[in-house]
Image (cartoon, grey):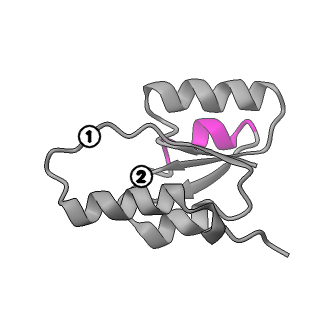
């Protein structure tokens, strides 16, 4: 499964659409479940989360073969929050595979 963060954004949409057109299993992650409906209608699994939520990202990455994440800098984000996001994205050992 491929997990796409920011699936409703400019680049996330392109990546999600390309993978879905190739019949790949895709989990789209975004803040608004209604905006993810365009992907779920084509077979994607929706996961509503904010990229600053470490626990939610760990759940979103469960069973992932790969994660697409392109996050522009947020000048209002604290150093601690930024570190948590980087840690969650870079820690595949924490992505548990469902049994």
Q: Nearer the viewer, mark 1 or mark 2?
A: 1
Residue at 41%, 52% (x, y): give it.
Answer: 31
Range drawn in magenta? 34-42
Residue labelled with disc 2? 31
Location of residue 79 in the rendering, given as x and y in whole percent from the top left corner: 20, 60
Location of residue 80 in the rendering, given as x and y in whole percent from the top left corner: 24, 66
- Answer few, some or many: residues within 10 Å of disc 1's Cα (few below 14, many 20 plus, some between 14 and 19): few
Residue at 59%, 42% (x, y): give it.
Answer: 37
Q: Nearer the viewer, residue 39 or 5?
A: 5
Residue at 62%, 60% (x, y): give it.
Answer: 61
- Answer few, some or many: residues within 10 Å of disc 2's Cα (few below 14, many 20 plus, some between 14 and 19): some
Residue at 77%, 69% (x, y): give it.
Answer: 97
Say what secondary structure mark 2 lies in. Answer: loop
Location of residue 6 in the rendering, given as x and y in whole percent from the top left corner: 46, 41
Is residue 67 toward the left or the right of residue 33 in the image?
A: right
- Looking at the image, tell me whether mark 1 or mark 2 is earlier in sequence order: 2
Is residue 62 toward the left or the right of residue 8 in the image?
A: right
Residue 11 in view in this figure = yes
Disc number at residue 73? 1
């Amino acid at each position: 499964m491929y997990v796409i963060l920011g699936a409703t954004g400019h680049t996330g949409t392109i990546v999600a659409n390309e993978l879905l057109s190739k019949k790949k299993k895709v989990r789209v992650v975004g803040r608004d479940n209604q905006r993810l409906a365009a992907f779920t209608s084509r077979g994607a699994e929706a996961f509503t989360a904010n990229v600053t939520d470490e626990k939610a990202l760990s759940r979103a990455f469960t069973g992932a073969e790969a994660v697409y994440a392109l996050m522009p800098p947020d000048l209002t984000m604290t150093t601690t929050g930024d570190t948590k996001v980087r840690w969650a994205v870079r820690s595949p050992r924490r992505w548990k595979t469902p049994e």
